[in-house]
Image (cartoon, rainbow, N blue to C red):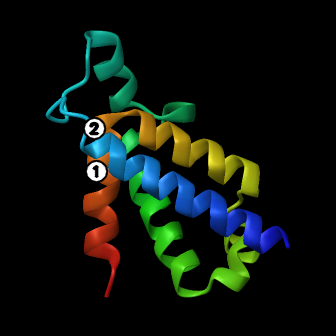
Amino acid sequence: MKSRMVLWSLLLALAVAALGCAGGQGGQPENAESAAATEAGPAGGSAQDEVQMAAAIAVEIEAAPDRAVEILESHGMTPDQWQELMYEIAQDPVKADAYAAAKQSAVP
């Protein structure tokens, strides 16, 4: 049951990310504050590293959706943290574009 919730959250997040990519902003942040937030992720890690990690996790989950919770736990995340990360990426056009590119290159 929990795996199904994680899977639906993942699919929703991917759909939102895809819609965000088509937002018409050309992948450019709206202002300097948004650009600065895109450069650094939480705890001083780069946003690019965060996006790369999210793409790698998404590929793992898509390959074995019945193990979604286990996969998230192996990356030190809960389903709620995963959903929050996916929404964060989907809301930022630059991150959403980077996520889509990273996910595309991660798929064998």
Identify the element where label 1 is drawn: helix
Left or right relative to 70: residue 32: left
Q: CB atoms at circles 1 and 2 under 8 Å apart?
A: yes
Left or right relative to 102: residue 82: right
| Image coords of residue 39 (percent x, y) | 33, 30
- Label 2 Cα crowd, 10 Å radius (few <14 / some 14-19 / many 20+): many
Q: Quadrant of the N terminus?
A: bottom right
Residue positioned most to the left: 26
Task: Place residue 56 in its image quadrant.
Answer: bottom left
Query: As rendered, which of 38 and 15 lies closer to the eye?
Result: 15
Residue at image mark 1? 98
Whether residue 73 appears in this view of the structure is no
Query: Which amino acid type is marked by label 2?
Result: Val
| Image coords of residue 27 (percent x, y) | 19, 35
Query: Which amino acid type is marked by label 1?
Result: Ala
Residue at image mark 2? 94
